[in-house]
Amino acid sequence: MGLAVARLAHAAEDMEIVGAVCSSVDPGQDRDIGELAGLGTVGVVATADLGAGLLGADVVIDFSTASAVPGLLAVAARNKVAVVSGTTNLDAAGKQALEKAAEAVPVLWAPNMSVGVQVLAEVVEHALRRLGAEYDVEIVEIHHRRKVDAPSGTAKRLADAARSVRGQLRDVSGREGEVGARSADEMGVFGVRGGDVIGDHMVYLLGPGERIELTHRASSRELFAHGAIVAARFLAGKKPRRYAIADVLG
């Protein structure tokens, strides 16, 4: 994802890559980010030093690991660098770090940077308001075999969208044996893993005599990098607070 972001940022006329941060065990450390991304030399070397990597930046785009996010947010807030983060599976400490950083700099965190997924979540909310409690909600996500967390952050985002309308819904991650009839407050959220699937998300609204199937399929990983670039462009110069993809869409 970092290399995809670098390629798109390099191609943008209104952006300049001024730093690149990687893990201390990343084989790309101390190499030019342009060479790593297939762009040729751009004069920016990947470093494990957060302070050095963020020096001179207006916005940092983060696709890393949940454990790295609090440290990144602290350094970004200290250096007055806005943060766009698409890192998923944040724990309580990570979420608290987002709130603290947003007191000093603009922060946009989203489990999926796709504007299409944001619209899908809005459609889910609208549909449930219109359809009422007779319609059951089930969510299925499919990802490549190497994905380490389940359900996906996007599936959780869609479940939250459903709960914003029907607050009593509770997640069910599996059904086996004689579980009895489906209760009205169940919402199945299921993960499927295999192959090289980038990311498919399906929301099923199942009612009496009919069903609605809402689907988003990602066909390129650059989709998420593009969304992050759009978010970074939006965030530059904004006042400190938490932002969302919905704000980017207006």
Image (tube, grey):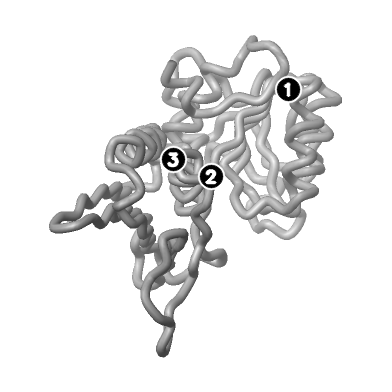
In this rendering, is residue 34 above or below 94?
above
Type of amino acid under label 3: Phe
**Front-most of 177 and 245?**
177
Which numbered mark, 3 or 2, is in the foreground of this view? 2
> Is residue 172 left or right of 116 when viewed as pictured?
right
- Between the C-alphas of marks 1 and 2, the distance is 20 Å
- Which image quadrant: the C terminus? top left
Which amino acid type corresponds to the residue marked 1 in the rendered image? Val
Mark 2, secondary structure of its residue:
loop
The single residue placed furthest to the left in the displayed view is: 209
Q: Which residue is mark 2?
A: 111
Left or right: 67 as drawn, with respect to 139: right
Query: Which residue is labeled 1 in the image?
Result: 81
Q: Which residue is drawn at the image coordinates 33% and 47% (left, top)? A: 220
Give the CA separation, mark 3 to mark 2: 10 Å
Tell me which amino acid carries mark 2.
Pro
Who's the residue at 49% across and 67% down the image? 172
Q: Quadrant of residue 207?
A: bottom left
Residue 107 occupies quadrant: top right
Is 136 in front, or is 146?
Answer: 136
Rate crowding at label 3 as few (under 14), some (14 to 19) or many (20 or more) other CA atoms within 10 Å.
many
User: Which label's residue is closer to the chain start, 3 or 2?
Assistant: 2
Give coordinates of residue 171: x percent, y percent.
51, 61
| Mark 3 or mark 1, earlier in chain | 1
- Residue that badge 3 annotates: 224
How would you rate the neighbour count of disc 1 (Cα within 10 Å): few for under 14, some for 14-19, many for 20 or more? many
Q: In the drawing, does residue 114 fall left or right of residue 244? A: left
Q: Residue at x 52, y 65 (%)?
A: 150
- Report how far apart the C-alphas of labels 3 and 1 lie in the structure: 21 Å
x, y percent for residue 108: 61, 29
- Callout 2: 10 Å neighbours few (<14), some, many (20+)? some
